Image (cartoon, rainbow, N blue to C red):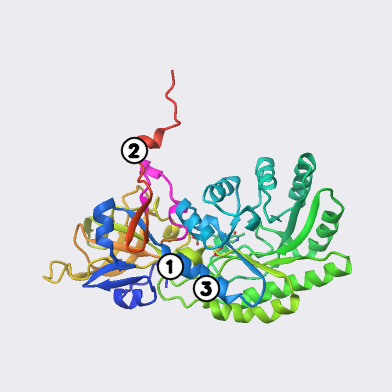
Amino acid sequence: MTHDDTFTINPIQHVAHLPFLAYKNNRLTMDKVDLNTVANEFGTPVYVYSKQAILANYQAYVDGFSDIESQICYAVKANSNLAVLQTLAKAGAGFDLVTGGELARVLKAGGDPNKIVFSGLGKSHADIAQALQVGIACFNVESVSELYRISEVAQKMAKTAPISLRVNPDVDAKTHPYISTGLKDNKFGISHAEAIQVYKLAKTLPNLEIVGIDCHIGSQLSEVNPFIDALDKVIELICQLKTHDIYLKHIDLGGGLGVRYTDETPVNLTDFANALLPKLKTLGLKLYLEPGRSIVANAGVLLTKVDILKPTEHKNFAVVDCAMNDLIRPTLYEAVMAVIPVNLDTHADNKADNKIWDIVGAICETGDFLAKNRTLALAENDLLAITGAGAYSFSMSSNYNSRPRACETLIDNNKIHLIRERETVASLWEGEHLLG
Ligand code: LLP
């Protein structure tokens, strides 16, 4: 499905795929809480997450790979709210990070440093020092220069840095080019061809301990084959390393499992695990995985209100109170996300007819849209839910057009918790200075 297609999403069928959402008396509920209540209490736009759904998605990984030693490291970038991290930390999750900022968040949320892997292309000296100080499980190294940098910082601190190399297996993840990372043209990792040389170099550098090998080929993958291809390439390297007396303790296959936003049929977790397990069992190494999206995307919705309806001769625009600053995925990746009414009976009196709408924000950019060509019956003040908004939504939000960011809430046991306040306009210029 693309933005050019005109389509209708049947809300009842759509939520049938999302276990924590259901219509009760024609009102959309999350874990039995009426989403109208969340909107009334906290205003819109508002992100709403389900604690149960986050935990169920995490547990599915743990169960799927329970036959081997494994550590699921949630990719913090998908949703880094402290309460989300805390929920996962308490359940035993580890974390995959890419900045010192994410490390600080995980520690604040009670994450166990021993279960942290640190990915990312540009780890600063300070990031490395902080990670060594708290004793993380592994640095996923992305370049020769970084290898020298980690060795140098570790020497100065008289510590040993556990490292793995992130290899770029040159596998086509068959996903959007902006979120494909495992091709030789991508900036990530160390090429398959150079990996052995770099491991040999790592062996000679002081204060490094080689513990693993890592790859991450992309995000929102809908097929299992690219994962298998990447695993095969990594296994090839693990075998070659043994001939150089380099023995590893773990293999990290990154994240990337896709989710259903509208009509996708991504591999389910059991099939994913069953496809990988035979090879992993033979290997006998501890497995690390770094899922982000598949844990939180469909555990969240973004609630927004229809502000202004603007039907025109050529197109009908529904201007809603959220915008690309709250959810940049539709415009940045051409991502098609479902927009469904929170109340199914609002137009029982035929106050609004079905029309084809572009659902847009009020930002001064043509690229500011949430969805295009959707058949919906809309009236001003209608409440809509954008599903799949638990991942890469708030975490990619901005203050463009001086829009305060929306608040975040989490539902736990029928209770709505405010887990991040709505920003105020005055907070937007905190830290700015007028001249003279
Ligand atoms: N590990 C590494 C090294 C990564 O770079 C990523 C995501 C993950 C794990 C988690 O991947 P996931 O399981 O979430 O697919 N903003 C984009 C997605 C960017 C993904 C970047 N890396 C989007 O909204 O589609």
Across and down, in percent, residue 428 comes to 39, 37
Q: Residue at x 75, y 73 (%)?
A: 235
Q: Give the amino acid type for the residue marked by disc 3 in the picture.
A: Ala
Q: Which mark is residue 53?
A: 1
Q: Residue at x 27, y 72 (%)?
A: 23
Across and down, in percent, residue 156 comes to 78, 39
Q: Which mark is residue 278?
A: none
Question: Which callout, 2 or 3, points at the residue further toward the start of the chain?
Answer: 3
- Asked whether the residues under the numbered discs 2 and 3 touch, taking CB atoms below 8 Å apart as contact, a structural biologist would say no
State how far apart marks 2 and 1 are (Cα): 32 Å
**Span highlighted in magenta in the image:** 391-408
Kindly state the secondary structure of the residue where label 1 is placed.
helix
Ligand 1 sits in quadrant:
bottom right
Q: Residue at x 69, y 42 (%)?
A: 129
For disc 2, the marked residue is 425
Q: Which mark is residue 60?
A: 3
Q: Give the amino acid type for the residue marked by disc 2 in the picture.
A: Val
Q: Give the amino acid type for the residue marked by disc 1 in the picture.
A: Ala
Would residue 230 be found to the left or right of residue 342 on screen?
Answer: right
